[in-house]
Image: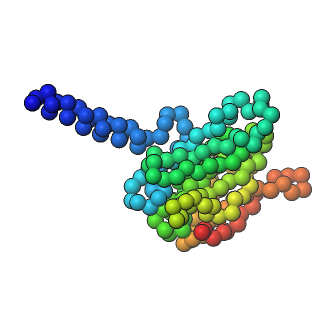
Amino acid sequence: MKIIKSIFILCALAVAFSAVAQKRPPKGLNYALGDFNGDGKKEYVYFVPPEDADRWDGLDDLDGLNGVLKFTDASIPDIFVERCVTGQPRNLGDLNGDGRDEIGIQPGWVTSVWQVYRVFTFKGGKWQDAIPSFTINLNYGDFDKNPPVKKVGKGKVRITTFAWENDDVVKKHKVVRVK
């Protein structure tokens, strides 16, 4: 009887430890913590680069270099990010007041410091753009200290975008509504 009890305790401990281990993103990947599906529990979102991300310069076709945002809560669907070999997901907080944190992704691509910043929101069981995507320049701005998306009111954010005008990079600000 003691052996069966010991086996049962060991199995219960193994299940408990594996559940805890699954709550963390894989080591070495960029991640953010938040309540992205609105269930009141925190989960991690992490960026998984495409398989050929480290050898892109030897590829004939770059169209397949798409990254994926995955979640430690397996019930949350993945987000496929086109033309993205590196990515830093960011928890932008609940921008639209629906009880779910939105995700910003600062992508990295192989050919340029000009990138498209995207913000995702989870609605109706699927991911969609919370605001229109916009252009950033990775050489201009410390996005850790000054993120390109800041909440300025209920359902409104100020985005910082960059443009090429008169042979110079110009920083612009714009207030947009969140879906």
Q: Determine the image quadrant of residue 2.
A: top left
Question: Residue at coordinates 81% horizontally, 52% vertically from top-left?
Answer: 169
Residue 74 spot, x, y in % from top left = 45, 48
Residue 158 spot, x, y in % from top left = 64, 65
**Residue 144 higher or lower than 157, as above or below:** above
Report the number of numbered marks: 0
Residue that sits furthest to the right in the current view: 166
Viewer-proximal residue, 58 or 171?
A: 58
**Relative horizontal placement of residue 169, taking residue 140 as reference (left or right):** right
**Relative horizontal placement of residue 166, taking residue 22 as reference (left or right):** right
The quarter in which the C terminus is drawn is: bottom right
Question: Residue at coordinates 9% horizontally, 30% vertically from top-left?
Answer: 1
Q: Determine the image quadrant of residue 154.
A: bottom right
Q: Say whether residue 46 is visible.
A: yes
Question: Residue at coordinates 41% horizontally, 40% vertically from top-left?
Answer: 22
Residue that sits furthest to the left in the current view: 1
**Residue 141 higher or lower than 111, as above or below:** below
**Relative horizontal placement of residue 25, taking residue 163 as reference (left or right):** left
Viewer-proximal residue, 38 or 146?
A: 38
Q: Determine the image quadrant of residue 64.
A: top right
Residue 27 spot, x, y in % from top left = 49, 34
Q: Say whether residue 108 is visible.
A: no
Question: Residue at coordinates 42% horizontally, 52% vertically from top-left?
Answer: 42
**Relative horizontal placement of residue 73, taking residue 139 as reference (left or right):** left
Say how the picture is coloured. Answer: rainbow
Residue 107 spot, x, y in % from top left = 67, 46
**Residue 166 higher or lower than 53, as above or below:** below
